[in-house]
Image (spheres, rainbow, N blue to C red):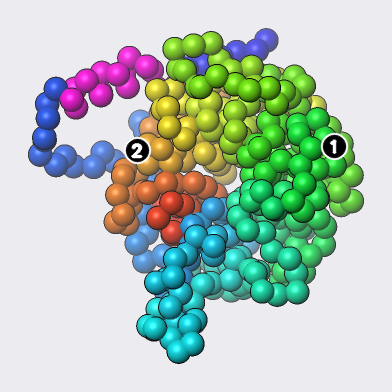
Amino acid sequence: MAMRAFVGSTAAWVALGLAAAACGPQAPQAEQPAVSASTGTTFEVDASWPKPLPNRWILGQVSGVAVDSRDHVWITHRRSSLVASDTAALEQPPRSECCVPAPAVLELDQEGNVVRAWGGPGGELRWPRTEHGIFVDASDHVWLASTGPEDQVVRKFTLDGQLVLEIGVWGETGGSADTMRLGLPADVWVDDQAREAYVADGGGNRRVIVFDSETGAYKRHWGAYGKAPSDDSLPAYDPAGPPSASFRSPMHAVVIARDGLVYTADRANDRIQVFRTNGEFVTEALVAPETRIMGSVWDLQLSPDPEQSWIYVPDGANRKVWILSRKDLSVVGSFGHPGRMAGAFDWVHSIAGDSKGNLYTGEVNTGNRVQRWVRMPR
């Protein structure tokens, strides 16, 4: 039976806003620990990670983070988000020592050193304007999603950046019923055993779409509640109204648990929806439902314990990461706060985890960084 949970009550959010308005200026308060009594775990930022980038490289918006089977961390960033003063070292003559855009894809080891780096405009291979999600599958292929209107493709590469497979048509979209063209695909997750690639085709379209991960052949797709997706216009999100019958752009991420449940980040609807691999709807939960700008569910990461007991949900609008129980999708904690120092967030956009339970977050807007959060059992 389908279930629906509400996470982060409206009353609590309203009360918080009223209290802040009534009290006016307040003395700074100590940051709340990133801990949940239920999980018994804290997360502490490692300000020494990663190491400084070589070659005077600088990062733009870090839109995607992934971890491979060796616990190496992969990021993709948006070179196009850098402004002229960030890249003055490229000018002839150089206007400053700073800086050179890093390649669009970087692999970092556990010590924070750059192991590989490749991709970006200017080479023989056409490169997307707006990099988004990244995923590394069990066969060591790197998958990239892209959300620029002139992009519309998901691509599969070797570890060294050789193109293996391309899904979609550059610069073309056909709506949420099209089985060959995509609509601003935001994220990709590969089911290695089934050899299927799940795409969160939700920057423009409103669906999950599944392809053969070896050939790119279309397999199936679905919208919110497992129904056929609709591209009809939607009213503005209203937390007091009925839940939307449709995913709302951007539908931002897709993750598959070991037990076969498929989790989607319906970002602008402030919710997670859960499905079986055939698209059958299972349950949903709202997260911080009073969030009216940009949405609260930006990405998803499952914990590495055998039951995958916890879900980590970056929330760029509220600048924190929520910790949810996977059992009932209830919030059991959070970490992070607004700011630009280590341990704070601008728009936290993406998240990934390693086999030890450490987390890695990427920031967009003007955050332009990846941070490591070390799991500290209590």
Please report the bounds of the magenta region as a residue range: 7-21
- Type of amino acid at the residue the image marks with label 2: Val
248 up-or-down from 303: above or below:
above
The residues tagged by marks 2 and 1 sit, at their Cα atoms, a distance apart of: 43 Å
Q: Is the magenta stretch mostly helix, strand or loop?
A: helix
Q: Which of marks 2 and 1 is in front?
A: 1
Are the residues flagged by discs 2 and 1 in contact, CB closer than 8 Å? no
Residue 261: where, in percent of width, then height?
A: 69, 30
The N terminus sits in image quarter: top right
Q: Can residue 107 be seen in this view?
A: no
Q: Can residue 11 be seen in this view?
A: yes
Q: Mark 2 points at which residue?
A: 35
161 up-or-down from 321: above or below:
below
Residue 16: where, in percent of width, then height?
A: 25, 23
Q: Which residue is drawn at 73% across and 65% down?
A: 126
Q: Is residue 10 magenta?
A: yes
264 up-or-down from 130: above or below:
above
